[in-house]
Image (cartoon, rainbow, N blue to C red):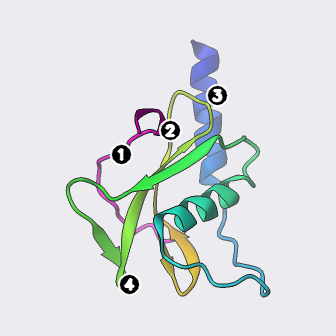
Amino acid sequence: MAALALAAVAAAVAVALVVTRDSAPDEPPLRWSRPSIERALEQRLAAVPLSVRWVQCGVPREGATTYRGTTVLRCGANFGAPHMPVYCATVVDGRLVTDRDVPSLRCGRTAPRPRSMR
């Protein structure tokens, strides 16, 4: 049990250390769509020393929030630990923006439906 708690804490610390990465100059700007946001977030999280299994995003049931005119999605990331960190994510000026980049970014409290329930 203590090992699981330690793993969850390690996962939370590692995820918190993820930094903003700009797109390479030769990459096209990111377009807003749920699949493209999921892919971009999954790629960003791949830099964390834990292996991300999947990322799934959705609009919270209580209603969408916006940031700079774009809808903010609530995303769950599965690292294989008992706790799934939640990210608020959107696209601004062709770049992925998360609540780790802009702490004031909010996306509601309802988690996306896990892939196993689709």
User: In what quadrant of the picture does the C terminus appear?
Assistant: top left
Visible residue check, residue 6: yes
The amino acid at mark 4 is Arg
Q: Residue at x 50, y 33 (%)?
A: 83
Q: In this orientation, which residue lies closer to the viewer: 25 or 102?
A: 25
Which residue has dot 3 on it?
A: 7
Ranked by sequence position, the earlier of labels 1 and 4 is 4
Comparing labels 3 and 2, the label whose residue is closer to the camera: 2
Q: Which mark is residue 111?
A: 1
Q: CA distance from mark 3 to mark 1?
A: 22 Å
Near mark 2 (Cα within 10 A), the count class, few <14, some 14-19 or many ≥20, is: some
Q: CA distance from mark 1 to mark 4?
A: 22 Å
Check contact, mark 2 vs mark 1: CB within 8 A: yes
Q: Is residue 66 above or below residue 25?
A: above
Check contact, mark 2 vs mark 4: CB within 8 A: no
Ranked by sequence position, the earlier of labels 3 and 2 is 3
Which residue has dot 2 on it?
A: 84
Q: Which mark is residue 68?
A: 4
Q: CA distance from mark 3 to mark 4?
A: 36 Å
Q: Which mark is residue 4?
A: none
Q: Look at the image and give the residue range highlighted in magenta.
A: 102-118
Q: In this orientation, which residue lies closer to the viewer: 98 or 90?
A: 90
